[in-house]
Image (spheres, helix red, strand yellow):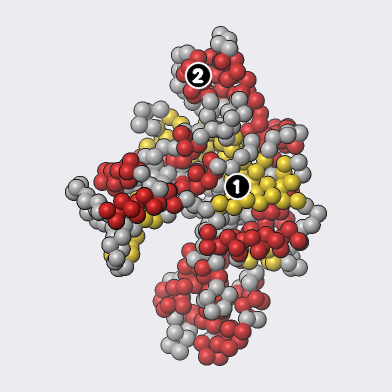
Amino acid sequence: MKDISWSKEDFLQIEAKGINEEQLELQLKQFVEGIPYENLIAPASIDNGIVKLEKDQKKNWIEKFENSFAKKLKFVPASGAATRMFKNLFFFLEQFDHDEESLEDFVKRTDKKELRKFFQQVKNLPFYEEVINSQYFKNNLTLEGFETAFLKALLSEESLGYGNYPKGLIPFHNYKDEILTAFEMHFLEAVNYAKDKNVAQLHFTVSEKHIEKFKRTQSQIEEKYKDSSFVVDYSFQLATTDTLAVDNDNQPFREKNGELLFRPGGHGALIENLNNVDADIIFIKNIDNVCVHEFLNEIVDYKKALGGSLLEIQEKVFETLENLDKEKPEAINDAQKLLSHCFHQTAKIEDFTEAKALLNKPIRVCGMVKNEGAPGGGPFWVNDIEGKASLQIVESAQIDMSKEDQKEIVSKSSHFNPVDLVCGVKNYKGEKFNLLDFVDPAKGFISEKSKNGKTLKALELPGLWNGAMANWNTIFIEVPLVTFNPVKSVVDLLKPSHQPNT
């Protein structure tokens, strides 16, 4: 790599962001050397890393959770805008001319079949009435045609502006008598399991530019559900977690005015936000994966069961750690059993110090659903650089699919990561772990982007539930598909789970 000449202005910009020289050097090194792919050993499966939840065990864990006085919190990453969700709609607006071709001809020419479904069922979308009653749509219907007028009214800043809206505040659910956003649905979930002294505790990570929109909507929700009490906190992704962009020669990418280009570090940056909240049990779930009225009770039961399983394993771990402090001879054997039977770790423990180091970590219980072809990460057995096997959530970008053995392992995977986590972030003395101590910095992502017509390379930090939690003790438990209702594309809102019961 060429030597980099930092200017005085560079140092001032870097200092203003609160980023230190060591961080920059690590980032530049990762661009030059690349980030190694994960070394998959096997997919995690039932009885090979994933626990199948039996009826009696589920009941016991629910009871344990309901009888607990642990402080509970629901943590929701919600900073994303809805732009990607409307990707094909933006493409349509850029390319379609209703005077030149029909919608059907456009779909055939571009192979964007999603658009056909969107307009065929447009009346079932939760924002349909809002769009067609907007003045923008009415004024432009004749001039631009239905499709273009509808999408411009939906997406453009001159009208509803949903194209750049926070994803959590887009109308998601059409339930006959009410239209609900994902944001509101998380409140309904939290009331049922994330309560501390009968007050539901929620924390949303949001974009600073959208904070007022969220707070206004929060006020409306609290007015609507007067019988429930909520404590809601917000945080922003820290500027110190932004990463430096580079060009194809791995030199710092510069804006037209010569300034360095820093980009948000991805959802892995939120480990900082998670580290700053205070609770005994933290539920993590993405903003766009929300409950469905029809299955709310079942979803809540599984949340409680996951929470109860965490409480049960914590009790065993904490008791063993206390006995290790007292150097009771049987404690090493107890620690070995816990690591082997609960966390599937095969390391041979030699002494009290090693046993404490392996057990005294944050714990995450992760719900896993059966894989039905959804894109994203999954549970796998992975070898680390020391050759030790561990259970990890692995994203597709972390897998070298050009290698036949890795490709075959992925093809045999049975489960998918829906981002349904319950986290224990305090130690056996009741002290908060510093979660940054358990991040594996070598598990980030490098992607290709563009700015001002020039190609650049961007670095994403180790993902929140991937590399940022790589050194936690992990348990995978199977949960049913009804607990997984994500909205990645706008047409997902047409699924039965988001429509009124008929």
Q: Amino acid at mark 2?
A: Ala
Whole-angstrom CA distance, mark 1 to mark 2, is 31 Å
Q: Eyeballing the image, is 113 above or below 243?
A: below
The image shows residue 89 at horizontal and vertical percentages of 49, 72
In terms of depth relative to the viewer, which is nearer, 249 or 489? 249
* Residue closer to the observer: 338 or 118: 338
Q: Which of the pair 334/497 is nearer the observer?
A: 334
For the C terminus, which image quadrant?
bottom right
| Residue located at (28% from left, 62% from top) | 258
Residue occupying the point 46% across, 41% down: 468
| Rendered position, 310 above or below 199 | above
**Outermost residue toward the right in this view:** 227
Marking on residue 75: 1
**Residue pictured at 41% horizontal, 27% vertical:** 388
Q: Cβ–Cβ below 8 Å for labels 1 and 2? A: no
Which numbered mark, 1 or 2, is in the foreground of this view? 1
Which mark, residue 355?
Answer: 2
Q: Please, is residue 142 above or below residue 376 in the view? A: below
Question: From the viewer's perspective, is 12 left or right of 332?
Answer: left
Element type where label 2 sits in the image: helix
State whether residue 291 appears in this view: no
502 shown above or below 24: below
Corner quadrant of residue 215: bottom right
Say if residue 236 shows up in the picture: yes
Q: Amino acid at mark 1?
A: Phe
Q: Residue at x 72, y 44 (%)?
A: 195
Q: Which mark is residue 33?
A: none
